[in-house]
Amino acid sequence: MTKIAIVTGGAQGIGRAIVHHFLEKGWRAVALDKDAEAVEDLRGAYPGKPLLAIACDVGKEDAVGRAFEDIAEWQEGEPAGIDLLVNNAGIATPYAGPIEELSFADWQAWIDASLTSAFLCARAFVPGLKRRKGAIVNIASTRAVMSEPNSEPYASAKGGLLALTHALAISLGPDVRVNAVLPGWIETGPWQKASERNENPEHRDVDRQQHPVGRIGKPEDIAAAVDYLSGEQSGFVTGQHFAVDGGMTVKMIYEH
């Protein structure tokens, strides 16, 4: 039986790297992304691969419902069920400006992109995940546990994902395991759609050296963590939060 992964925000950046990773492992993959141009670019990058790429705003209930129907049609003839749901969708920038100037609509956009979308997709795909004893991996952020100024909606959305992670883990066990990955600074330039791709992003020495591991993160680092959390090797792990940040969240920083 061929395994299947569903990845939200799957046409660019970290999500695209996760889709690539599982396609290379021989899985079937579904990428849901609201950027139609990126979706077309993704389709063109994997001709002949078992990939379904759908332009879909997963923060909207009706859009998730339509995507569910499209996936069910695509899966006809395949064994029923889903092995992995990766809730990766979200607004990439964390900076919202001063809270006293933040509109409710902008606040809600951050919440819907990351947190509402994870709820909607979990609700839609849990029956399929239970059928195959699958896993959910929520892509949060180290900004769920630490902040820069003027990032309240981003931090709140990602922090909500951590709470949703442990709540789902308790509700869905033992049939479905649920964990979260907290990326740090991840350079996504090479994994963007063609019109915005940067194959050779530049960074300062200090950018690399401030990380205890001596480099900036890559989307492949996050894909590897998701791989671990998707399989039997993590069968005794649920409700947990894994920082993949080069050590930055445990580095004590004071000015001297």
Image (cartoon, helix red, strand yellow):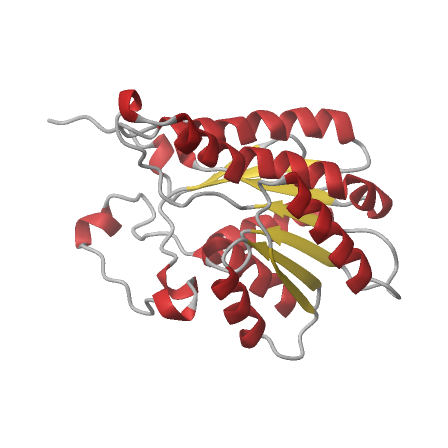
Q: Position of residue 238 (x, y in %)?
A: 67, 33
Number of marks present in the image shown: 0
Residue at 70% in and 70% down? 50
Camera-side residue of 210 and 187: 187
Relative height, residue 183 to residue 102 (above, below): below
Q: Does any portion of residue 25 appear in the rendered image? A: no
Q: Position of residue 243 (x, y in %)?
A: 47, 38
Outermost residue to the top: 100
Residue at 74% in and 58% down? 70
Outermost residue to the bottom: 48
Residue at 37% in and 39% down? 247
Q: Which quadrant of the rendered structure holds the C terminus?
A: top left
Residue at 57% in and 65% down? 20
Camera-side residue of 36 and 191: 36
Q: Position of residue 141 (x, y in %)?
A: 45, 37
Camera-side residue of 73 and 79: 73
Q: Which quadrant of the rendered structure holds the N terminus?
A: bottom right
Q: Position of residue 131 (x, y in %)?
A: 86, 45
Q: Quadrant location of residue 176?
A: top right
Q: Does any portion of residue 56 appear in the rendered image? A: yes
Camera-side residue of 64 and 127: 64
